[in-house]
Image: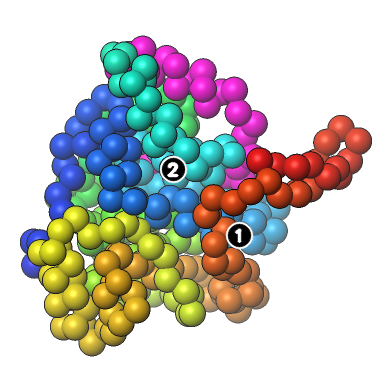
Amino acid sequence: MQTHFSHINQSKAVFDDIYALDDPRAYFSVLGDLDYMIPDVAEPVVRQILAAKVSATGVKPTVLDVGCSYGINAAVHRFPLTFGGLRHRYARREMRAIGSETLVRLDRNFYAAWPDVGLARFIGLDISAPAISYATGVGLLEQGIVADLETEALSADSADLIRSADVIMSTGCIGYVTEKTFSKILDATEKRPWIISFVLRMFPFDSLAATFEKRGLVTERLTGATFIQRRFRDAEEFESCLASLAALGVDATGLESEGLFHADLMLSRPEADARAAPLKHIVTVASGRGRPIGPRYVHIEGDDGLQVALEP
């Protein structure tokens, strides 16, 4: 059965304009004003799943980020950075005053100056050519694909790029894309990849799970935890979301009813992988991990082995 999300999206905020620009300053400004946080709250979980994937295969995986926009998921995974910290960087008046070409040059140097602590290499897929150009231009993505796979076929060159993907992830595109997009991606892969999906609870996942099952992938949902995406833009968006959840029989009490979009985590994998390392065994959610706190002691790997450091 084909999924139709258009009626659910009718009262959801539209941010098309911020993805059509040559750099992410408006993206950080507009979404930051709504306390957008899904890249930050998802990253510790993504890291644990990728660590499990590396443990199972012994190789550094290739991640295809679907709906990657400006490469923010790659940024917060590969470098010791957060969405919130990047937002403050771009909010400075000095950063707002420069042109996009200058910003791209500065950002390329900025990211290159940080240690790459990522567990994977990233490629991206998005409908926005400017966003893909920025993400590849500053080095967040190794390569990018510009395509709307809801309406377009996957080109031969893009299929070649996707073929080696070990992991497919999305942190907010489901609802805008359906099983149409994921079917075309999976048809191009030479492996049976792991699929990490953070899905707003107002969007049913049944058709996607069925599509994955036809390709030999079973889907697990992480129970006992949800992941905040952002605040509601206005009362209309709030009430529309609650109505959509009620229509699905989903209880919003204490979650969306408190004024925040919540997402579920779904992990789709070959059944043998799921049996060997169930989702509940590889992911631990520590509430408050992303909140600002005082200096804390951490272990770091230095030239002389494991050392204790005070991290501000």
Q: Is residue 11 magenta?
A: no
Secondary structure at badge 2 equals helix
Instruction: Name which residue type carries label 1.
Output: Gln
**Residue at 47% from the left image edge and 57% from the top image edge:** 41
Instruction: Name which residue type carries label 2.
Output: Gly
In the rendered image, residue 281, in percent from the top left (x then y), is placed at: 63, 74
Residue farthest bottom in this picture:
249
**Residue at 39% from the left image edge and 74% from the top image edge:** 213
Q: Of label 2 and label 1, which has the lower sequence position?
A: 1
For residue 57, above or below residue 282: above
- Crowding at dot 1, Cα within 10 Å, few <14 / some 14-19 / many 20+, comes out as some
- Residue 84 is labelled as 2
- Residue 246 is labelled as none
Chain part drawn in magenta = 100-125
Residue 261 appears in which quarter of the rendering? bottom left
Residue 20 appears in which quarter of the rendering? top left
In which quadrant will I find the C terminus?
A: top right
For residue 47, above or below residue 131: below
- Crowding at dot 2, Cα within 10 Å, few <14 / some 14-19 / many 20+, comes out as some
**Residue at 28% from the left image edge and 80% from the top image edge:** 252
- Residue 48 is labelled as 1
Q: Is residue 112 magenta?
A: yes
In the rendered image, residue 102, in percent from the top left (x then y), is placed at: 36, 12
In the rendered image, residue 294, in percent from the top left (x then y), is placed at: 63, 48
Q: Is residue 64 visible?
A: no
